[in-house]
Image (cartoon, helix red, strand yellow):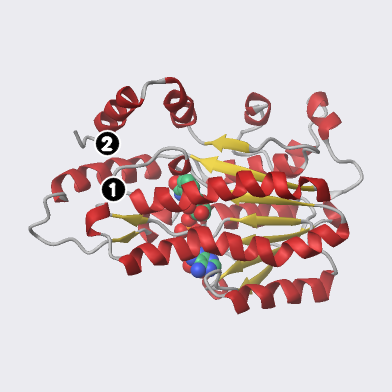
Amino acid sequence: MIDLLMGCESESLGIAACLADPHNASMSTRRNASLSARQRVVLLTGASSGIGKACADLLSEAGYVVYGASRNPDRICLPPDGWTPMGVDVTDDRSVEECVEAILEAEHRIDVLINCAGIGLAGAIEETSISKATAILQTDFLGMLRTCRAVLPTMRNQGGGQILNVSSLAGRIGLPFQGLYSAAKFAVEGLSEALRIEVRPFGIHVVLIEPGDIRTPFTDNRTFVDVADSSPYSERMKRALRKAEADERAGPAPSRVARQIGRILAVKSPRARYTSGGLFQRAASHLKALLPDRWFESFLSAYYRVR
Ligand SMILES: NC(=O)c1ccc[n+]([C@@H]2O[C@H](COP(=O)([O-])OP(=O)(O)OC[C@H]3O[C@@H](n4cnc5c(N)ncnc54)[C@H](OP(=O)(O)O)[C@@H]3O)[C@@H](O)[C@H]2O)c1
């Protein structure tokens, strides 16, 4: 299926054209014909930037009714193309509840939830304060839990829905000097796997999206632990982060993940997870499953120059 999804990755191809590809007959048979894009209401978090913004633009262009949530909707540099920005902080219970209530008042249903809001945190685990650890877990993990809890009663009552949780390759592999980010994304993975089984009888599909490095403002928005001048980790940490940042800045555009998400929404019975990004990075999680742990650790340490 990955090959099938990747077969439609040209930068210039919009989702509408991609979904309408008459040559892709096997994909067409998997489409849920009863739900046209035009009828489906989407709540997407992290919509002001990067992957979320690309996704909101693409889905609204394809006819979905998109509500895009972020803390700073007024900072969106390009005006949203046909979708509705909402000011929401996913670390705040009430803010998430009010957002869902407002959408239900206007649309009376929510068909799709895409959890894309996220922040990064870099630094040695030993030097990570509990408050910094709490902040990333609050956004990347509990933020996702909050939105899932807020929409699930509606999806159950309306007889179905789709929840796409944007995890990361870092949710499959513990990245050195991004340990708390990996921990948050591993938590997203575990919760999504369990939730997928719990809600399947209600017609709700839960899917993990695992991008590799993607070229977005995430790199510049990344937060850091406070590092002392005398830190025994500083040289190795700098090397690892230089490599990670270089990979991100050289990564594919966020529109690639957005197009993949669009295609997944058109699949009637989606898989549990979809990787996204460069071939090497997509292969890395399979390599981890195949290699003995020590070999994989050596490979990862060499890759990030932290031996
Ligand atoms: N870029 C990559 O290489 C990469 C790779 C793998 C996975 N990912 C994942 O993809 C997702 C999107 O990342 P991105 O690359 O698009 O980064 P980005 O450009 O920095 O976008 C992050 C989005 O999250 C929103 N956000 C952050 N904290 C929030 C909060 N408390 N409440 C509501 N919204 C919040 C931001 O908006 P405001 O600041 O306005 O709130 C922004 O819209 C993240 O979950 C990230 O972990 C990214």
For the residue pair 4 and 128, the one nearer the viewer reads as: 128
Give the amino acid at mark 2. Answer: Tyr
Point out which mark residue 177 bears.
1
Under mark 1, the amino acid is Phe
- Do residues under tags 2 and 1 come within 8 Å of each other at their CB atoms? yes
Q: Earlier in the sequence, mark 2 or mark 1?
A: 1
Residue 14: percent from the left, percent from the top?
69, 43
Nearest the camera: 212 or 252? Answer: 212
- Where does the C terminus fall, quadrant-wise? top left
Residue at mark 2 to residue at mark 1: CA–CA distance? 10 Å
Residue found 83% across the figure and 69% down from its top: 107
Look at 78% across and 32% down and name the residue there: 21
How far from the left and from the top, in percent, is residue 222? 36, 58
| Residue shown at 53% from the left, 63% from the top | 142
Q: Is residue 144 visible?
A: yes
- Asked whether residue 83 appears in the rendered view, the answer is no
- Relative to 191, say whether 172 is above or below: above
Queried on whether the Cβ of the residue with tag 2 lies below 8 angstroms from ligand 1, the answer reads no
Q: Which mark, residue 304?
A: 2
Secondary-structure class at tag 2: loop
Quadrant location, the N terminus = top right
Of 162 and 33, nearer the camera is 162
Q: Quadrant of residue 132?
A: bottom left
Of discs 2 and 1, which sits in the foreground? 1
